[in-house]
């Protein structure tokens, strides 16, 4: 047992504007000018007051769990956060190095709130905090994060933390890596699968820590029928090989070359905190996150139907139109939602969804406390591939019905005005051609053109960035020519060409 005394820590706190780096979903800032031990200690104390203490079960001491990634600043910052919690009488379990889904597992497994220190795929100078309530329930802007920010800001402005509660929390350490790996293996059984060769690019992030435990035997679990070729498994928060952001195609180049070079069946790429997983087929071509969403949804729907339950699957509005079509064809109910993990998790709870997927390669599972886990999604794809004899490119083709543009950003002065101007122009053109359009405003504006005698199906969405003067375009068409025509037309309107 490690006993910490926050009174030993400096009582004076730095002055900083928390609204500059505490946004809709998490905390993410540069170290040390925005995030240092004093700032994080104040956020930890506020997390205790807003989340942990009000949720503490009757008759049991309040407790929270903290994990961290491989960034050089993460151990110090996670300890400062623990000091802030302990100063408010909260006991703390430190689980050390883990992926973000490893922290969500700990929160669900232990039934207590948690905090993960990571800046995900951001460059080395960043760090951040992802917080959750007991059972990995999200803490977002409308579910506690704003209150945490405001309370911490008031204390930073005052220059000191409040007086201790009278009892100082105790801090201990626990290793949950094996329990995490065991839990994932109970959800997807790969033991009887045909043998696969898998190249995994961890990008020097936490996938290099969790993959050997879950897919290998580093945690003392039996070996699986997988031959793993590791790439960049060395934990290094300076990211010496490439950024741990597989959403950027430049960071997939090494993996795309390695898969055919090794004669592998599949490639997997994880981001820095390993809560997202990207898939490469045997030819070195990416499998879209929409296709992965549909592939995993098909497996989860079948499981729900076998259990006599009505399957509901969440997808955000940027995923391919193929996703809801496949969900419905397989007997599930598709539910469309906004982009963002807090929205997905809340909607999953509301409708009892078994699974949810996003275009950004976040995948959410009811059996994993409705939290996102890249590793479990990877295991589902491995199982789907191993259960049949075709190569991954042929399997994935079933789910790649349409052609998408990917997300394209444009700098604009007034995102709302630009969006309305674009939509008006597109509507005017469609009306002149006698075409019917559907427009909705769930998240930004989505314009949908159903297939007609004159034109194939297409749609586009325009969403403003929450943090930058950017307008984000996603477009999809029934074929390449249709998508390109829509993409180029909308971009020209957005950029004033």
Image (cartoon, grey):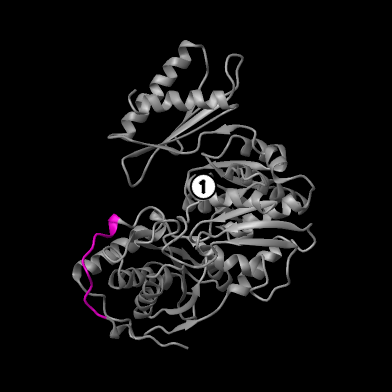
Residue 462 in the image: x percent, y percent?
Answer: 42, 34
Marker count (numbered): 1
Q: Residue 39: image x %, image y %?
A: 29, 69
Q: Residue at x 73, y 50 (%)?
A: 385
Which residue is most to the front?
261
Q: Quadrant of residue 157?
A: bottom left
**Magenta run includes residue 12:** yes
Instruction: Specify whether residue 343 is painted magenta.
Output: no
Q: What x and y, as percent, mark residue 236? A: 46, 66
Q: Is residue 354 visible?
A: no
User: Which residue is depicted at the point 57% across and 27% down?
Assistant: 480
Residue 260's place in the image compared with 8, above or below, is above
The answer to whether 100 appears left or right of 47 in the picture is right
Residue 482 placement: quadrant: top right
Residue 48 sits in quarter: bottom left
Q: Is residue 272 above or below residue 441?
A: below
- Magenta-colored segment: predominant secondary structure: loop
Q: Residues within 10 Å of mark 1 (few under 14, many from 20)?
A: many
Task: Give coordinates of residue 74: x percent, y percent.
Answer: 40, 70
Q: Identify the residue shown where x is 40% and y is 28%.
A: 491
**Front residue of 280 and 182:** 280
Q: Which residues are magenta?
A: 10-20
Q: Is residue 110 visible?
A: yes
- Is 358 rendered above or below residue 89? above
Say which element carries label 1: loop
**Residue picked out by circle 1:** 360
């Amino acid at each position: 047992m490690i006993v910490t005394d926050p009174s030993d820590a400096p009582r004076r706190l730095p002055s900083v504007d928390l609204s500059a780096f505490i946004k809709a979903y998490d905390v993410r800032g540069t170290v040390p000018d925005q995030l240092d031990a004093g700032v994080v200690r104040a956020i930890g104390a506020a997390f205790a007051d807003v989340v942990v203490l009000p949720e503490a079960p009757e008759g049991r001491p309040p407790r929270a769990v903290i994990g961290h990634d491989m960034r050089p600043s993460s151990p110090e910052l996670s300890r400062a956060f623990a000091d802030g919690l302990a100063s408010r009488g909260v006991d703390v379990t430190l689980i050390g190095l883990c992926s973000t889904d490893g922290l969500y597992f700990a929160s669900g497994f232990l039934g207590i709130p948690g905090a993960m220190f990571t800046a995900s795929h951001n460059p080395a100078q960043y760090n951040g905090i992802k917080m959750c309530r007991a059972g990995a329930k999200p803490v977002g802007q409308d579910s506690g994060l704003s209150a945490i920010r405001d309370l911490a800001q008031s204390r930073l402005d005052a220059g000191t933390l409040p007086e201790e509660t009278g009892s100082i929390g105790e801090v201990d350490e626990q290793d949950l890596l094996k329990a995490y790996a065991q839990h994932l293996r109970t959800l997807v059984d790969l033991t009887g699968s045909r043998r696969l060769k898998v190249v995994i690019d961890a990008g020097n992030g936490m996938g290099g820590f969790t993959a050997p435990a879950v897919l290998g035997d580093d945690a003392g679990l039996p070996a699986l029928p997988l031959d793993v070729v590791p790439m960049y498994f060395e934990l290094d928060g300076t990211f010496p090989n490439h950024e741990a952001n597989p959403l950027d195609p430049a960071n997939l180049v090494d993996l795309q070359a390695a898969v055919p070079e090794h004669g592998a069946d599949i490639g997997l790429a994880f981001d820095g905190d390993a809560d997202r997983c990207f898939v490469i087929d045997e030819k070195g071509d990416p499998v879209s996150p929409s296709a992965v969403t549909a592939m995993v949804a098909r497996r989860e729907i079948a499981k729900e139907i076998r259990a006599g339950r009505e399957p509901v699957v969440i997808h955000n509005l940027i995923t391919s139109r193929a996703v809801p079509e496949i969900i419905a064809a397989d007997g599930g109910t598709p539910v469309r939602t906004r982009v963002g993990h807090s929205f997905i998790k809340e909607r999953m709870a509301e409708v009892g969804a078994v699974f949810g997927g996003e275009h950004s390669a976040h995948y959410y599972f009811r059996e994993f406390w409705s939290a996102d886990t890249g590793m479990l999604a990877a295991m589902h794809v491995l199982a789907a591939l191993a259960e049949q004899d075709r190569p991954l490119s042929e399997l994935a083709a079933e789910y790649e019905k349409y052609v998408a543009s990917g997300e394209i950003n444009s700098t604009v002065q007034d995102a709302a005005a630009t969006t309305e101007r674009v939509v008006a122009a597109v509507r005017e053109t469609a009306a002149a051609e006698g075409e019917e359009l559907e427009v909705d405003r769930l998240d930004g504006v989505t314009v949908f053109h159903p297939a007609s005698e004159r034109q194939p199906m297409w749609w586009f969405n325009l969403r403003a960035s929450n943090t930058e003067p950017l307008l984000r375009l996603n477009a999809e068409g029934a074929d390449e020519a249709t998508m390109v025509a829509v993409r180029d037309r909308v971009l020209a309107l957005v950029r004033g060409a």
